Amino acid sequence: MTQTCATLDLDAFEATRAAVAADPQLGRGTFRATTSWRDGTRAQTVARTFAVETDEPTALGGTDRAIDPMELVLTAIGACLTIGWVTHAAQRGVRFRDLRVEVEGDYDLRGYLALDEQTRPGFSALRYTIHVDTDAPDATLEEIRRAVEAGSPVVDNLVNSSPLTGAVARRPA
């Protein structure tokens, strides 16, 4: 069955694009997520009205009952790329029979376990593969790939490393 991107509201997307083009202030905002510790290495993060559970594998002291935070990074990349592919395909009239994004990240636990100062605790390399079943020509698929990478907020955050600041707020006694 050919996917049509029928649930993508391209009119709403284009209306938002036009409104932000006319008044850039409309495009500014803040996403917020709050993570609460549950037990051991388990936590729950709430963003808007959505909740995500996280945990560590048993080898790292967890119970392996939920996705690892590093896997959430891969999930964010795959989800953002998928949204971009669907949006850019719809704008070009491209139809998919199937679309799947596979994301991998290489890590070395020596960084996380503080065993080697030269080893990063995060991913040393990230890569993805778009698995697509479509009649669109290769040139169009490459055009979509380039446009998606250029416009992906998640890819941008990883490639350009957004500044991160932190603070501790102690609960009043």
Image (spheres, rainbow, N blue to C red):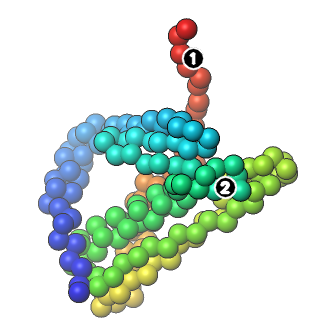
Specify the quadrant of the image occupied by residue 98.
bottom left
SS at mark 2 in the image: helix
Residue 158 at what x, y percent from top left?
55, 54
Left or right: residue 118 versus residue 46 is right
The correct choice, above or below, for 149 with respect to 32 in the image is below
Residue 115 at what x, y percent from top left?
85, 50
**Spatial separation of the CA atoms under disc 1 and disc 2:** 30 Å
SS at mark 1 in the image: loop
Q: Which residue is mark 1?
A: 170
Q: What's the amino acid at mark 2?
A: Thr
Identify which residue is drawn at 59% across, 56% down: 64
Identify which residue is drawn at 43% across, 39% down: 33
Query: Farthest residue toward the top?
Result: 173
| Numbered disc total | 2
Task: Indicate which disc, 1 or 2, sits on the residue closer to the N terminus.
Answer: 2
The C terminus - image quarter: top right
Left or right: residue 126 versus residue 101 is right
Task: Classify mark 1: residues with Cα within 10 Å, few (<14), some (14-19) or many (20+).
Answer: few
Specify the quadrant of the image occupied by residue 13.
bottom left
Q: Nearer the viewer, residue 118 or 112?
A: 112
Q: Which residue is mark 2?
A: 58
Residue 3 at what x, y percent from top left?
24, 79
The correct choice, above or below, for 61 with respect to 77 in the image is above
Q: Nearer the viewer, residue 79 or 13?
A: 79
Q: What's the amino acid at mark 1?
A: Arg
Specify the quadrant of the image occupied by residue 143.
bottom left
Residue 67 at what x, y percent from top left?
52, 56
